[in-house]
Image (spheres, grey):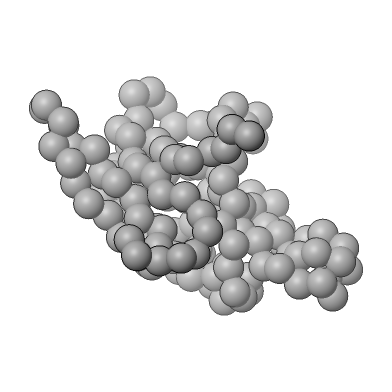
Amino acid sequence: MNRVIHFEIHAEDIERAKKFYGDVFGWEFAGWPMGDTTYWAIMTAPKDSTESGINGGFVQRKGSAPADGQAVSAYVCTVQVENLDETVTKIEAAGGTLALPKFAIPGMAWQAYYKDTEGNIFGVHQPDTNAK
């Protein structure tokens, strides 16, 4: 089966985006010079980690940021977290804004959607079989 192996986050201000995702999720970044620009790899877990998941990168946004209320026209990635409420506090402290408030996926998890500092929507997901 074909599976997603990499993601990219478009950013107007890559340094601001790196700070946001580093502060909220603890992700780390490594720059790879590519001609007249630098591609910023995103590591969501240590290199020798056995955790499942994928890594990604930042891409310099080539146009304007998505407008508020505009339909999503890209994949939306969701990050699994241990505590959704604590993560929401970090997201808001780092400059993220609410897109869709916390809701239950009955018998499975709690889910919410936020916008990062670059206007991109992402999900946060806390497994919880008691969610209702």
Outermost residue toward the front in this view: 1
Q: Residue at x 61, y 75 (%)?
A: 83
Would you say 7 lies left or right of 18 here?
right
- Residue 7 locus on image (x, y percent): 45, 40
Q: To which quarter of the image does residue 29 belong?
A: bottom left
Mark yes or no: residue 7 visible. Answer: yes
Identify the image quadrant of the N terminus.
top right
Identify the image quadrant of the C terminus.
bottom right
35 or 55, nearer to the observer = 55
Q: To which quarter of the image does residue 104 belong?
A: bottom right
Q: Residue at x 35, y 55 (%)?
A: 43
Mark yes or no: residue 22 visible. Answer: no
Q: To which quarter of the image does residue 38 belong?
A: top left
- Residue 30 locus on image (x, y percent): 22, 51
Q: Residue at x 54, y 38 (%)?
A: 4
Would you say 37 lies left or right of 106 here?
left
- Residue 112 locus on image (x, y percent): 68, 58
Whether residue 80 is situated above or below residue 86 in the rendered picture: above
Q: Residue at x 76, y 72 (%)?
A: 128
- Residue 125 locus on image (x, y percent): 65, 61
Whether residue 68 is situated above or below residue 35 in the rendered picture: below
Instruction: Report the number of numbered marks.
Output: 0
